[in-house]
């Protein structure tokens, strides 16, 4: 269970902001769970409160594939913008050694001394006062060792790297999980935070302690190796694991993967491209397990769509120069030699037609059409920028070849590379995520990393399942409910084999960032029609 008072002191969030945040969150959690009812997106009534109404119109497949349950209902419970009241500011007392500052936590959002108002209490959200807990030695986090649970206490463990190379991401995922707990959990819910240290050994130790402390579900770990290591101990205790990995090979036998699957992204984008008449594809991918996974998914999706993959080119992701790979994909040398040969034939001819043809060829780099109409570039970040800049240089014209990508293109700054403008990729709709990002920034003073929504949705799911009519239900039947759930990345559901199926949108790269050109489906019935 998190020591919230100490966390407050480190975050240095303004008391007025936390007050409004907690008031709204408390109002949300004090109600019955309307997101368990939701068949449609909830609207606001005259007073602004969320109301989920059952859909009146019957549908043929309602019993096998109803609409998803909602993990959030109505207005987001955390304010995205607040006008602070005028409060006199004074210097704060020095922090005590018992609560060292978190180096990753933001400072005061206004850049001034903190308010004189007394610190707010998170006690209504806890099962016991923080003073009854003992410190746990987790670097960068003041947590606590759980006291014996009461009969109705529901404990869920969050396993994230709070130290090691992925510590910043782990801290952000912890922050996101806390937002979900405040929004959805009741007083019986406890989140046990355990540091995996970014290693498989650390994950096993964290899971063992969590199970011993009475955790009924494990959220995390982050890396596939850690998830694989945790699996046996969790299965032996009959504790389900909802991991943040995208490696489908680790799913099953009580382990579920929340991560975004490359195969789902490829299926969506190929189905959309096929609807636009594209049949010939090529792939440029890193020579890694991820790259091979993407290529296999592309081949399978294109085959189902009745098209063909004309060219596949792998490259060393550690290379300093990607030109050889791009050059080979473009068949640049062959097409260049063909151009030079035609120029030479026309040089000695004096007729007007030959002169015009020669002049036209002087403006070209190569001659001859490429054997593909769409190119999938399976990378992101700086490597994607470096590769994309080489494509026009080796005469792969983005105006003639449709650029396509994976979820790694889901970056608001992707439009800075001209060669990618107009490109397509599949990803969760950014609409719901934008509310989360605003709330996260308002609470923690900085923008969340892309994967933070996984921790939010996982924690929200755990809180929802913990509030069942007959008590907490973390059974496979409850986790894999066919209707699925609405989360901050749109609809998702766990298939019986343990992987997450999602409703994805198709995005187009623009100078202002990605924009939706094909909406994400609202139900999995609609998703099946969209992808097939």
Image (cartoon, helix red, strand yellow):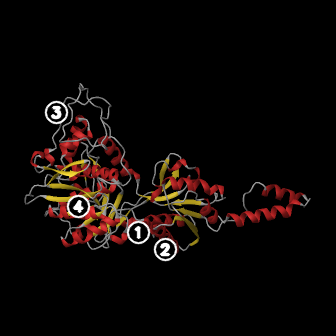
Residue 490 place in picture, x, y as percent: 36, 57
How far apart, in angstroms, are the residues tagged by discs 2 and 4? 39 Å
At horizontal 27% and vertical 74% (from top left) the residue drawn is 253
User: What residue sits right under mark 3 in the picture?
Assistant: 118
Residue 131 place in picture, x, y as percent: 10, 45
Mark 4 Cα within 10 Å, few/some/many (few <14, many 20+)? many
The quadrant in which residue 9 appears is top left
How far apart, in angstroms, are the residues tagged by discs 1 and 3? 54 Å
User: What residue sits right under mark 4 in the picture?
Assistant: 206
Residue 396 place in picture, x, y as percent: 64, 59
Of circles 3 and 2, the one toward us is: 3
Of circles 1 and 3, the one toward us is: 3
Q: Earlier in the sequence, mark 4 or mark 3?
A: 3
Q: Is residue 233 visible in the rendered structure shown here?
A: yes
Please tell me whether mark 3 sits on a helix, a strand or a loop.
Answer: loop
User: What residue sits right under mark 1 in the picture?
Assistant: 528
Q: Nearer the viewer, residue 11 or 258?
A: 11
Contact flag, marks 4 and 3 (Cβ < 8 Å): no
Q: Earlier in the sequence, mark 1 or mark 4?
A: 4
Give left or right: position of 395 versus 472.
right
Give left or right: position of 101 versus 505.
left
At horizontal 25% and vertical 29% (from top left) the residue drawn is 85
**Residue 523 higher or lower than 5, as above or below:** below
Q: Earlier in the sequence, mark 3 or mark 2?
A: 3
Q: Earlier in the sequence, mark 1 or mark 3?
A: 3
Please tell me whether mark 1 sits on a helix, a strand or a loop.
Answer: helix
Q: Earlier in the sequence, mark 2 or mark 1?
A: 2
Of circles 1 and 4, the one toward us is: 4
């Amino acid at each position: 269970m998190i020591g919230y008072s100490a966390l407050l002191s480190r975050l240095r969030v303004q008391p007025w902001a936390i007050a409004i945040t907690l008031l709204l969150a408390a109002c949300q959690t004090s109600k019955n769970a309307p997101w368990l009812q939701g068949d449609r997106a909830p609207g606001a009534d005259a007073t602004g409160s969320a109301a989920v109404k059952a859909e009146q119109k019957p549908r043929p497949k309602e019993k096998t594939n109803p609409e998803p349950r909602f993990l959030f209902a109505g207005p987001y419970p955390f304010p995205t913008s607040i006008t602070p009241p005028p409060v006199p500011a004074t210097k704060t007392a020095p922090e005590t050694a018992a609560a060292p500052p978190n180096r990753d936590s933001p400072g005061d959002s206004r850049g001034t001394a903190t308010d004189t108002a007394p610190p707010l209490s998170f006690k209504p959200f806890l099962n016991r006062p923080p003073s009854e807990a003992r410190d746990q030695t987790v670097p960068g986090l003041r947590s606590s060792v759980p006291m014996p649970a009461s009969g109705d206490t529901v404990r869920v463990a969050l396993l994230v790297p709070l130290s090691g190379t992925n510590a910043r991401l782990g801290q952000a995922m912890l922050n996101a999980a806390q937002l979900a707990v405040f929004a959805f959990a009741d007083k019986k819910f406890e989140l046990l935070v355990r540091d995996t240290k970014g290693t498989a050994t650390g994950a096993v130790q964290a899971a063992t302690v969590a199970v011993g402390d009475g955790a009924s579900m494990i959220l995390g770990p982050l890396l596939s190796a850690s998830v694989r290591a945790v699996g046996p101990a969790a299965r032996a205790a009959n504790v389900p694991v909802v991991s943040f990995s995208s490696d489908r090979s680790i799913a099953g036998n009580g382990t579920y993967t929340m991560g975004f699957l490359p195969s789902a992204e490829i299926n969506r984008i190929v189905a959309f491209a096929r609807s636009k008449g594209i049949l010939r594809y090529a792939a440029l991918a890193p020579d890694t397990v991820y790259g091979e996974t993407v290529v296999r998914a592309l081949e399978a999706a294109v085959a189902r769509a009745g098209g063909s993959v004309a060219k596949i080119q792998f490259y060393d992701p550690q290379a300093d120069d990607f030109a050889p790979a791009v050059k080979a994909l473009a068949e640049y040398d062959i097409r260049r030699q063909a151009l030079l040969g035609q120029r030479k034939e026309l040089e000695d001819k004096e007729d007007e037609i030959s002169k015009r043809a020669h002049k036209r060829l002087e403006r070209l780099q190569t001659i001859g059409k490429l054997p593909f109409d769409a190119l999938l570039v399976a990378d992101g970040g700086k490597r994607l920028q470096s590769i994309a800049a080489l494509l026009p240089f080796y005469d792969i014209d983005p105006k003639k070849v449709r650029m396509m990508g994976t979820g790694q293109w889901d970056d608001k700054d992707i439009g800075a590379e001209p060669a990618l403008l107009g490109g397509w990729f599949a990803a969760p709709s950014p609409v719901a995520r934008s509310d989360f990002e605003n709330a996260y920034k308002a609470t923690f003073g900085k923008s969340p990393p892309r994967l933070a929504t996984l921790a939010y949705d996982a924690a929200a799911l755990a809180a929802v399942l913990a509030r069942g009519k007959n008590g907490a239900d973390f059974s496979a039947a409850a986790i894999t409910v066919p209707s699925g759930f609405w989360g901050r990345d749109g609809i998702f559901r766990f298939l019986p084999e343990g992987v997450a199926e999602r409703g994805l949108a198709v995005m187009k790269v623009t100078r202002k960032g990605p924009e939706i050109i094909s909406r994400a489906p609202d139900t999995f019935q609609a998703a099946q029609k969209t992808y097939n």
